Amino acid sequence: MIALGLEGSANKLGVGIISHPSPSKPPLILANLRHTYNSPPGEGFLPKDTAKHHRTWVVRLVKQAMRQAGVKVENISCICYTKGPGMGAPLQSVAIAARTLALLWNKELIGVNHCIGHIEMGRAITHAPNPIVLYVSGGNTQVIAYSHRRYRIFGEALDLAVGNCLDRFARTLMIPNNPAPGYNIEQLAKKGRHLIELPYAVKGMDASFSGILAAADVLAAQISEDLDEGKRLRAEDGEVVTKADLCFSLQETVFAMLVEITERAMAHVGSSEVLIVGGVGCNERLQEMMALMAKDRGGSVFATDERFCIDNGIMIAHAGLLAYETGIRMPLEESTCTQRYRTDEVFVAWRDQDTA
Amino acid sequence: MSPTKPPLVGASTPLPLPPPFSHSALRLLTQGAEALVFHTTLLDSRTPVALKYRPPKPYRHPLLDRRLTRQRLLAEARVLVKCRKEGVLVPDVVALGADEGWLGLGWVEGATVRRVLDKWVGKRGEEGEGELMGLMGRVGRAVGRMHEIGVCHGDLTTSNLMDSPADLRSLAGDIVLIDFGLATQSIQDEDRAVDLYVLERAFAATHPVAEPLFQEVLRTYGESYKGAKVVLRRLEDVRMRGRKRSMLG
């Protein structure tokens, strides 16, 4: 069976085409295209502009994906789209595109939970059978374990998502949003030498990032190049603190928090495997720290690269097709989208009761 | 006691422990995500202590690691001292190596409430009913007293409640609260209600038939201090949402 997936819950528009040849064979990726809306440095992406971007590009991307995949319309079983969670206006624009395609081609529609898309794609790519999942992106921060047909949330961000914290700090420092603010922070952090103290906010298996962002913003004001050399913030060794130092300190702090809550969840359920998904999951320092923790517990870490970590259409097609194959259908009248859609609301009919 | 080799825990756990425990006879009791708890002795071989060791985490920046370990051990020690001062039964703080990552606690004789329940619940008939109810009453009062002085435990399970000294025949011991690794100094109804919720879940998970017993915990808790009734009402809210909020966009 073949599915076309449309993703547009944030600033990436993704179109993917996937084939599930048979239950015993791995899925085949026929096309995986993405177009990203980038706002200028110092600004975030606004819902209105982002939706406009998606509307402008969706037809071109679908045509291109169909050409690349070399599939005929009649071979497609269903159109999958992101039902939520995400930003309202971009979600709506992509849902309209999905409904239009379904009516035009007379196909079934499947609305997909964005988080489930990330998890299922990560599992398919890495072959991790039943890992603890750390889902970290610009909109979500969750520690998830599978049990009894649900992806259960063990820990989560109490306020900002970790990716949002990084993105907004990139705005404070006027770091470009292209290709991604988090990527640019990661590159700068590699040059950081000093660890500057920031708050550390873990509560059980939950974490909070808003206070850290506020504290980092205060520090950023103290290293501004407008200040006299003598008035700028200095590290303990007397050297002037740089942007790179702040990026390094922010990453070290928030990633340590993420690894800690993941480790706590692993100890709780007795698992030794971790899968990192979501845009922040591309960060190699986070992957490295997680691997050190997993090694200590006699386990290992699974991660994917930017093609699957960052929002994409293929994960929506994959998760949608998994649901479609279990007989799930979505009438046109119910093909809505929603900004609030928790990971644990989805009944996972395609997995066994406990594992695999 | 002969100096035995400490049990191997995790591939790269940095053992042996820092001085003065480098050559102590250690018996591993539990290993959590954060800390290892050992039975050992301090000063002389007749003074048993529970040694809580937070090993360095290789994934954390060394500066951050030292800061966190120090802060957490100090916070735990402060809460324990506060409880002690206010008459809540907890282990004594015997010694502290905040920079080395360890906390020595007075040994608590007895059995965990979890073990007591394992042994007693499921026995047929009325036998033991009264003793169990008495035990539950003491649990409720102990938790209430801790909340009253402004401490929330953060990980209140039946494994973190000791019946001391253990007398599995009459259940006549006192309730001693242990493991304050996640404790906070808080007087918020929300934190208190979450404590009760966690305890309720622990009861339900390990002793499904013991759930009626928990009602007795709540009843005595409700009478244990001014403000307890408000917390019980808050508990209903916490139950409804299962400690989870609806997702915010």
Image: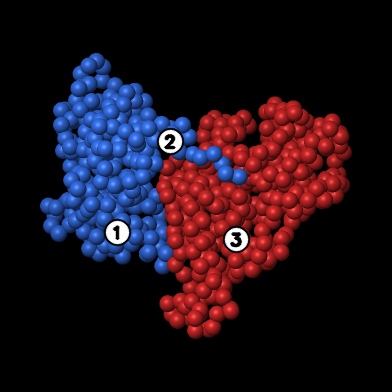
Residue on which disc 2 sits: B238
Do circles 3 and 1 both sit on a common chain?
Answer: no
Q: Nearer the viewer, mark 3 or mark 1?
A: 3
**Quadrant location of residue B203?**
top left
Residue at mark 3: chain:
A
Q: Residues within 10 Å of mark 2 (few under 14, many from 20)?
A: some
**Quadrant location of residue A97?**
top right
Q: Residue at x 31, y 65 (%)?
A: B99
Disc 2 secondary structure class? helix
Q: Colour of chain A?
A: red
Where does residue B19 sit, x and y in percent of width and height?
25, 64
Q: Colour of chain B?
A: blue
Label 2 to label 1, Cα distance in Å? 30 Å
Residue at mark 1: chain:
B
Residue on which disc 3 sits: A168
Q: Residues within 10 Å of mark 1 (few under 14, many from 20)?
A: some
Q: Residue at x 22, y 16 (%)?
A: B126
Amino acid carrying label 1: it is: Leu
**Residue nearer the viewer, A221 or A152:** A221
Amino acid carrying label 2: it is: Val
Q: Residue at x 50, y 48 (%)?
A: A158
Asked if residue A299 shows in the view, the reply is no
Amino acid carrying label 3: it is: Arg
Which colouring convention does the figure follow?
Answer: by chain
Where does residue A12 sit, x and y in percent of width and height?
72, 52
Residue on which disc 1 sits: B74
Please identify the quadrant where the C terminus of chain A is shown.
top right
Where does residue A25 sit, x and y in percent of width and height?
70, 38
Q: Return the disc, 2 or 1, that comes first in the chain's sequence.
A: 1
Disc 1 secondary structure class? helix
